[in-house]
Amino acid sequence: MESSINSFAITVENILYKIDKTLEAIEQSQLDYDAEMDINDIDIDDPEYDNLMFGNNVKVLLQDMDLIKWQQDLLADKDKLETILLEAINVTPDRDAKLIELRTLIENKIKSPINPKNRKVIVFTAFADTARYLYENLADDFAKRGIYSAIVTGSGDNHSTLPIPKELRRSVKMTDINTVLTLFSPISKECSKVYPEVNEYIDILIATDCISEGQNLQDCDYLINYDTR
C-alpha cells in the first residue's frame, strides 16, 4: 500500500495509463492480424514487432490471445479504477486525516520539545512522491513561523525553505544533499566550520531512505515514519 493518498492516486493514474496503452495495442493487433505469423519465427527483440506482442520477460503475440475477453476485462478494470481515482482525488490536503495528524505531531513537538530548544524532526517515507506531497503541504506554512523545512530524495529533488542570503547562494547550494543535512544537523556535522556565515538552520527534514546510511544526524531527537502511521 502507498504511504499517502497522493501516492495512491498517482499509482492508480499510472495503472490507468498502462490499461489505455494495452487497449490501444489490442485494437492495433486486431487491425494487423496475420494468421501466418508465429512467435517462434520472429525476433522478439526487434522493435518492429513491439506493437504485436505483450509481456516483459515472457512475450506472447497479441493475436494468440483471447483479445475480446481481455479487452472486456480491461474495460471493466478501467471503469472501477476511474471511480477509485475520483474518490482519491477528492481527499484534498485539508481533508487528509493522516497529513493533519502529522502536522499536529510536528506542532506539538515544537511547542513541547523533548530536549530544551530542540525543534528538529525527521519525517521518513520510502516514497519520493509522498515526500514531495508532504513538503508541498507543510513547508510553506511552517516557514511563515520561522520554522524551516527541507526535502531530500534519491532523485536529487532536494530543496528547502531556509532563507539563504543572496551573497551565499553560490557556496550554500540547497540542491546538494550534504548541504541540506549539514544545515539540518549543524552540531554533529560541524556546520560552523563549513558554513560559518549561516546563522539559521533547518528544523524539519522530510526524506526518503537516501539518508539511511552514513549520515550523522544526532542533532535530531524525533523521528516519524510516515509510512507506518
Image (spheres, helix red, strand yellow):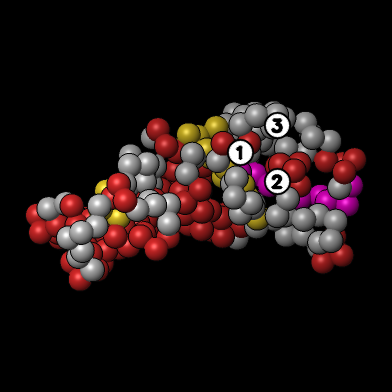
Instruction: Compare marks 1 and 2 and give the one earlier in the sequence.
Output: 2
User: Which one is in front, 12 or 23?
Assistant: 23
Mark 3 crowdedness (10 Å alpha carbons): few <14, some 14-19, many ≥20: some
Quarter of the image where the C terminus is located: top left
Q: Which mark is residue 210?
A: 1
Identified at 72% across, 54% down, the residue is 174
Mark 2 crowdedness (10 Å alpha carbons): few <14, some 14-19, many ≥20: many
What segment is highlighted magenta in the picture?
Answer: 196-205
Instruction: Compare marks 3 and 1 and give the one earlier in the sequence.
Output: 1
Identified at 55% across, 32% down, the residue is 223
Per the image, the residue denoted by label 2 is 177
204 in magenta: yes
Q: Which amino acid type is marked by label 3?
A: Gln
Quarter of the image where the N terminus is located: top left
Instruction: Compare marks 3 and 2 and give the one earlier in the sequence.
Output: 2
Per the image, the residue denoted by label 3 is 215
Are the residues at dot 1 and dot 2 in contact (C-beta closer than 8 Å)? yes
